[in-house]
Image (cartoon, helix red, strand yellow):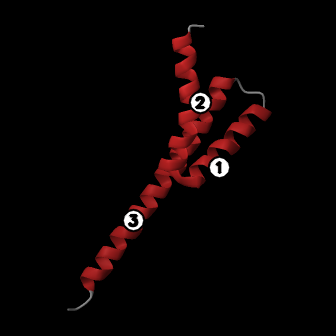
């Protein structure tokens, strides 16, 4: 393996968890770790395990974003209905 490829892989391994925690919060990181552990324990191949872990993190992040936007929209509608 070339040094360039090894450096890219190493950077990805270090940067991926930081990006997941910063962008997705702790819930996405915990769900990714849990699904990765379950995939490894059940004997799935490493690529499938990684895809499941990343997919789970993205799904958790998406659900949290949708719920937050709905809550914010409901709060705005509630404020607009109050008499002035």
Please give the name of the residue rendered at 62% of the width and 38% of the height, measured from the top-left corner.
Answer: 53
Quarter holding the N terminus? Answer: top right
Number of numbered markers: 3
Quarter holding the C terminus? Answer: bottom left
Neighbor class of circle 1 (other Cα within 10 Å; few <14, some 14-19, many 20+) is some
Q: Nearer the viewer, residue 79 or 21?
A: 21
The nearer-to-camera label among 1 and 2 is 2
Q: Residue furthest top?
A: 1
C-alpha distance separating marks 3 and 2: 34 Å
Q: Which mark is residue 21?
A: none
Q: Nearer the viewer, residue 47 or 15?
A: 15
- Is 65 situated left or right of 40 in this image? left
Please give the name of the residue rendered at 56% of the width and 22% of the height, measured from the top-left corner.
Answer: 9
- Is 42 situated left or right of 66 in this image? right
User: Which is nearer the N-term, disc 1 or disc 2?
Assistant: 2
- SS for dot 2: helix
Residue position for label 1: 30
- SS for dot 1: helix
Q: Which mark is residue 13?
A: 2
C-alpha distance separating marks 1 and 2: 16 Å
User: Which is nearer the N-term, disc 3 or disc 2?
Assistant: 2
Query: Residue 6, image x and y in percent?
Result: 58, 16
Neighbor class of circle 3 (other Cα within 10 Å; few <14, some 14-19, many 20+) is few
The nearer-to-camera label among 3 and 2 is 2
Residue position for label 3: 70
Query: Residue 49, image x and y in percent?
Result: 66, 31
Check if mark 1's residue and mark 3's residue have beta carbons within 8 Å. no
Please give the name of the residue rendered at 52% of the width and 46% of the height, measured from the top-left corner.
Answer: 59
- SS for dot 3: helix
User: Which is nearer the N-term, disc 1 or disc 3?
Assistant: 1
Q: Nearer the viewer, residue 5 or 80?
A: 5
In the depicted structure, whether residue 11 falls above or below residue 56: above
């Amino acid at each position: 393996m070339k040094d360039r490829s090894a450096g890219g892989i190493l950077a990805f391994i270090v940067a991926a968890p930081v990006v997941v925690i910063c962008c997705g919060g702790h819930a996405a990181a915990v769900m990714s770790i849990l699904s990765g552990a379950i995939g490894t324990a059940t004997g799935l191949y490493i690529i499938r395990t990684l895809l499941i872990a990343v997919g789970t993190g993205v799904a958790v992040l998406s659900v949290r974003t949708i719920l937050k936007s709905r809550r914010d929209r409901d709060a705005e509608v509630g404020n607009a209905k109050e008499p002035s």
